[in-house]
Amino acid sequence: MAETIMEIKQLNKYFGTKQVLAPLDLKIEKGEVVAILGPSGSGKSTLLRCLNGLETITSGELFFKGEKLPLTDKSWQKMRTKIGMVFQSYDLFPNKTVLENIMIGPIKVQKRATEEVQEQALNWLERVGLKDRAHAYPRQLSGGQKQRVAIVRSLCMNPELILFDEVTASLDPENVREVLEVILELAKTNKTLVIVTHEMAFAKQVSDRIIFMAEGKILEQGPTKAFFEQPETERAAVFLRSLDFSNL
Amino acid sequence: MSGFDIFFDGNNLIRLFQGLLVVVKLSVISLILGLILGVVLGILRTTSFKVIRVVLKIYLEIFRVVPLLVLLFVFYYIVPELLNSEVSNQVVSISVFILWISAEMSDLVRSGIENVPVQQIEIGKSLGFNSWQQYYYILLPQGVIPVIPGVINLVTRVIKTTSLLMMIGVTEMIRVGTQIIENYTVKVPTASLWVYGLIFFLYFALCYHLSKLAAYVERRQVNG
């Protein structure tokens, strides 16, 4: 029986008077890779940002490993060391080297020993093919390289859950593959990942479960294979057809 | 006696350089204290405490709108009355300058911090940084570097503005120069040309390098 990492109950989110997330419930199990799909403006990214407190929720409850989160700034600050996030903007700290970017969180926030963190950082950099860039500055890297470093930065915090927010959406097309390959590798290592993406082929390959959202609601969720072969809702079927270019 | 010989008559040249020293001393002391205070005020102006932000904005506007000379006179004549004791004119000068510099600096720091992209803060948050760490590791280093040219320009303005201090009796370079000229102007009609010429050169020597430095820093930032 898998352990539930994160659970949300009756989550509502308003921007002003506009409801962007209808009451929704969601469970994320340990070791699971969940892809959140849906048209633009469906609230995918907002939902993801609610999971690590970058957006405050209007009402509802969040549980981490069965424990209810108090949702205060202080408690989120602590939670965020357990919930990693990789952003669309692939930003690093521009005034720090690759290695410094990766090591600042573990050392300054988690107070871990420099040697141990450095070993882990170099180890991960090697696995994503960037060990020789450890002492480069972000401006010397391509977008894809920066995003791979951002993934390593998140990994070195040893999070129990990593959120990926459209991490390839701002990259040049030729840089997309190298980033997706890294995430695919991670998915095979029993890490718990929640991925918001527009890359359907990638979602199909990487995820165990699909959550399909539109207009701030979860319209359907289920095993990846079933979703792509036989979507339950018409809305999802239309969405998948609109992204299928094989019959152009 | 020619104009040039004035410098070597008595201890005129030494007195002028002593005046220069006063300029440097007052500038350095008020800059060190004023810039530090300005960074603190600038940070406070970016926090979420509305009352503090409003108060500091008013503080900035007062020191920006009221001419410095008026502030100097006000402090020079009123502060001793209030404290009921003598306050040396150098202390008055440094105090007024610290208030002025900190106000200007706070605005530079505020604009620098506000221009740091929000994504940088979100990365910090997602790594578990607390507010203090967000300022120390992200907002200050990234916010202050772009405003360095502005800070250097403020430094040159401060050095030049010390020339106002003669109005409250501080024996800085221009006041010394004026005294020397008054002494010689009958005997040597070109005295003011020579003395002010030297003062011109000394101010130029002080500020020119700073201007160049500001331009250099700015160019480097543009070129990355």
Image (spheres, coloured by chain):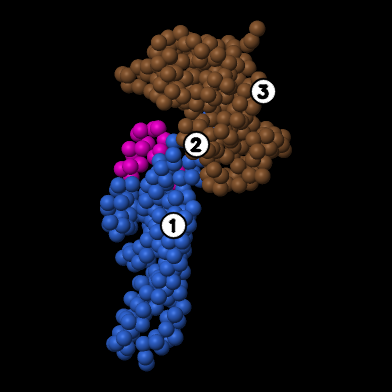
Chain colours: A brown, B blue
Circle 2 SS class = helix
* Badge 1: chain ID: B
Magenta segment includes B56: yes
Q: Which residue matches tag 3? A: A189
Q: Looking at the picture, does residue B17 appear above or below residue A102?
A: below
* Badge 3: chain ID: A
Same chain? Circles 2 and 3: yes
Q: Where is residue A244 in the image (x, y as percent from the top left)?
A: 45, 22
Q: Which amino acid does label 1 sit on?
A: Glu
Mark 2 vs mark 3, CA separation in Å: 26 Å
> Where does the N terminus of chain A fall, quadrant-wise?
top right
Q: Looking at the picture, does residue A75 appear above or below residue A223?
A: below
Neighbours of disc 1 within 10 Å: few (<14), some (14-19), many (20+):
some
Give the quadrant of residue B164.
Answer: bottom left
Name the residue: 36% across, 37% down: B53
Point out the stretch of residues depicted in magenta. Answer: B39-59
Q: Select label 1 or label 2 by which is in front.
A: 2
Is residue A103 shown left or right of residue B167? right
Circle 1 SS class = helix
> Where does the C terminus of chain A fall, quadrant-wise?
top left
Q: Which residue matches tag 2? A: A173
How many marks the image carries: the answer is 3
Residue B218 got which mark? Answer: 1
Is residue A191 shown left or right of residue A197? right
Q: Select label 3 or label 1 by which is in front.
A: 3
Magenta segment includes B209: no
Q: Position of residue A41 (x, y in %)?
A: 38, 23
Same chain? Circles 3 and 1: no
Residue B17 got which mark? Answer: none
Q: Which amino acid does label 3 sit on?
A: Thr
Mark 1 vs mark 2, CA separation in Å: 34 Å
* Badge 2: chain ID: A
